Amino acid sequence: MSPKKIVLRFPPQIVDRPLISTLVKDYDLMISIVKANINPYKEGSMVVELTGDPDNYNQGLDFLRDQGVRVEDLSEDIVRIMDRCTHCGACTSSCPTGALFISRPSMEVILDDEKCVVCGVCLKTCPVKAIEVNFNGKN
Amino acid sequence: MGVHRTYAEINDKIKSGKVVVVTAEEIIEMVEQKGVEQVASEVDIVTTGTFGPMCSSGAFFNFGHPSPRIKMHKVWMNGVPAYTGIAAVDAYLGVNELPEYDPLNSNYPGEFRYGGGHVIEDLVAGKSIKFEATGYGTDCYPRKKIETYINLDDINEATLFNPRNAYQNYNVAVNVSDKKIYTYMGTLKPKMGNAHYCSAGQLSPLLNDPYYRTIGIGTRIFLGGGVGYVAWHGTQHSPCGPRGENGVPLGGAGTLSVIGDLKQMKHQWLRGTSFLGYGSTLTVGIGIPIPILNEEMVRFTAVKDEDIFAPVVDYSYDYPNANGKSLGMVSYAQLKAGVIEVGGKEIPTAPLSSYVKAREIAGTLKQWIQKGQFLLGEPVQTLPSSDSEIKIKGLQEKQNF
Ligand code: SF4
Ligand code: SF4
């Protein structure tokens, strides 16, 4: 199975359980943690990338749900921090879908969310780091 | 014999609120409608602007002496080393400088997320930065180490002093090779998949005064959101290359060295900048007022994108090997329209310099002058021009002295 990115949300009462290690040990899944935000006694969240056998994958996720974890597909959005963007245009030639483009004749740079496929290229090409990625609506 | 104005006359009009200022964009249409003569009689000043990455930039600092005193031999500002080969508590921080722990291009393409340019932006934004210095200890400067936090208000002087800014025209970069390359002109796709340019064209200061008739040593300018001055011609100033009939150079030519008090600048106009696979730098905002001393200055400032041409240069082989080749000339009108043609191939373009911000700078400078807050500085000496016989030298490799 090709790697799949998902978001796990942990209610406060279970954040301290060793759930991730169980996924590795009992379900033989490879896990890479993309982002984690876990605090004792508070709701936590984690973006993980899972690789493994499809059956194990489904059973592993069922196990997490049984434990009270909310499992969501990852939705990532690209956000442009407007007061950091200089409208230089450097990102427009690397964006593969034309989501970032120059509006003429004003030469302002526009980001069309509809066309963005969240490939992440602009995160690195923007020289002033005006582009960030949001996971499931949260930065 | 047409209009003649002096700097003093224009400054009197600024003081009395009667000055007429337009931007380098606005004058184009005015001249089309009214003609050069009429516009020369109406307009006193044309404002220009540019906002692009300018690598030859940096700042001098005097940090003040701690007690006991130290002769700073090494200095780090937020981990970025500054040059200390000057007096005890003075240093120069260059915008390309990187922390010693930066993986550079060992993790190709390196991200260069934080360098000297970012330190300058942080300081101007009012942030505190970590300051570390070591010394070897002398009888008069016994201390060997200091670690503290500083901000711009804590230190004595902070002077932005950029040896080369505001390039008069520049190359258009393409990549003819089969693999993607990472350059100071941005990420260039293989087989001429894109073309990057870096000039504000018709709004750019030195393209509006191509022979430096009015921009010289002492010219007062908009620099990084504050007031600065032209200090000298910039390094690599090359005024004697080929020019078009309108006098505009057909490639990188004149440059400016500029100076100003960092403490009155704004972080929006001095932005730490990272080029993937290349390094870190500073994007600098510069605006220069051009006095309409006579009709000739109207003709110069009315220059349009379609009359300014830049050479297309391959950055995969020709540029790195300094062989001086160009793949053809294109106009800024074509570059800004988004597609150029080189050798029968259509190539999408993208800028690195912000035209939107260049326009904002020209507009801001216009307002400052209209409000009487900004007077023209008459140059005490003009810059070497096309008759100076300056030749740019390459570095020769020799075996002995
Ligand atoms: S993430 Fe990719 S598709 Fe979306 S705007 Fe950035 S470069 Fe374009
Ligand atoms: S590269 Fe960054 S600063 Fe430039 S237009 Fe794109 S998002 Fe804005």
Image (cartoon, rainbow, N blue to C red):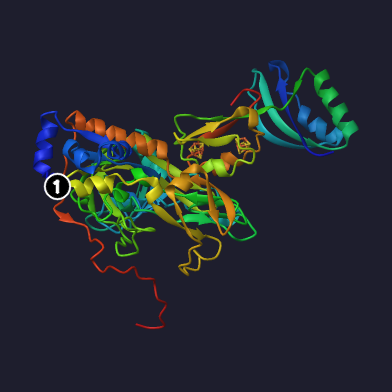
Q: Is residue B74 above or below residue A130?
A: below
Q: Is residue B12 above or below residue B89?
A: above
Q: Residue at x 44, y 29 (%)?
A: A83
Which residue type does callout 1 highlight? Glu
Residue A57: quadrant of the picture: top right
Q: Quadrant of the N terminus of chain A?
A: top right
According to the image, label 1 marks what residue?
B378
Please name whichever residue, B51 or B399, is drawn nearer the observer in this view of the structure. B51
Q: Is residue A55 above or below residue B101?
A: above
Q: Chain of mark 1?
A: B
Furthest-bottom residue in view? B400
Horizontal and vertical percent position of residue B126: 34, 33
Looking at the image, residue A114 sits to the left or right of residue B99; the answer is right
Q: Residue at x 67, y 24 (%)?
A: A45
Looking at the image, residue A101 sits to the left or right of residue B131; the answer is right
Please name whichever residue, B78 or B220, is drawn nearer the observer in this view of the structure. B220
Horizontal and vertical percent position of residue B269: 36, 38
Please name whichever residue, A121 or B177, is drawn nearer the observer in this view of the structure. B177
Whether residue B102 appears in this view of the structure is no
Q: Quadrant of the C terminus of chain A?
A: top right
Residue B363: quadrant of the picture: top left
Q: Residue at x 60, y 51 (%)?
A: B193
Element on which disc 1 rests: loop
